[in-house]
């Protein structure tokens, strides 16, 4: 499956896109992992981003796990809130943190 990260999620993940084979997700008892299992896998397997220096201040970057807790998700372009939804190898998961402005 293809995973696309936007805004703060991309910053926390350290990338804007990645490919994940559903069979790589450990502990899935079913043929296809659920959205919740995919999110847990992403949070557990993405190290915290390095600290960000801003002038004389040092800011700690937010972990992907923290960001995922605030995000909305699109699966194949459709909003999805059901974390028990099975995810398939051809699916595209968009990770959308809250946006401000317009």
Image (cartoon, helix red, strand yellow):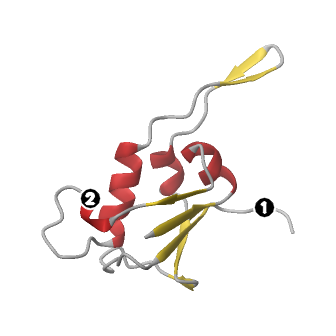
| First of labels 2, 1 by sequence position | 2
On the rendered structure, is 54 left or right of 22? right
Q: Quadrant of the N terminus?
A: bottom left
Q: Residue at x 44, y 42 (%)?
A: 46
Return the residue found at the far bottom: 78
Numbered label attached to residue 45: none
Which of the 4 quarters of the picture holds residue 56? Answer: top right
Q: Is residue 12 above or below residue 18?
A: above
Q: Quadrant of the C terminus?
A: bottom right
Position of residue 14 measured from the top left corner of the image (x, y, whole percent): 59, 43
Q: Residue at x 30, y 79 (%)?
A: 86
On the rendered structure, is 10 left or right of 25? right
Return the residue found at the far top: 56
Residue at numbered disc 2: 25
Mark 1 surroundings: few (<14), some (14-19) or many (≥20) residues within 10 A: few
Q: Is residue 64 above or below residue 33?
A: above
Mark 2 surroundings: few (<14), some (14-19) or many (≥20) residues within 10 A: some
Element at label 1: loop
Element at label 2: loop
Which of the 4 quarters of the picture holds residue 99? Answer: bottom right
Position of residue 79 measured from the top left corner of the image (x, y, whole percent): 54, 82
On the rendered structure, is 96 left or right of 31? right
Return the residue found at the far right: 102
On the rendered structure, is 73 left or right of 45? right
Q: Is residue 99 above or below residue 77?
A: above
Q: Residue at x 16, y 58 (%)?
A: 27
Residue at numbered disc 1: 100
Position of residue 28 measured from the top left corner of the image (x, y, whole percent): 18, 65
Disc number lying in front (2 or 1): 2
- The number of discs equals 2
């Amino acid at each position: 499956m293809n995973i696309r990260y936007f805004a703060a999620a991309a910053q926390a993940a350290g990338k804007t896109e990645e490919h994940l084979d559903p069979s790589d997700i450990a502990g899935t008892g079913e043929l296809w992992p659920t959205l919740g299992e995919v999110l847990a896998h992403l949070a557990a397997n993405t190290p915290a981003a390095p600290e960000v220096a801003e002038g004389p201040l040092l800011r700690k970057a937010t972990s992907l796990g923290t960001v995922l807790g605030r995000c909305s998700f699109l699966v194949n372009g459709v909003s999805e809130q059901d974390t028990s939804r099975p995810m398939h190898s051809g699916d595209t998961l968009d990770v959308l943190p809250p946006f401000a402005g317009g």
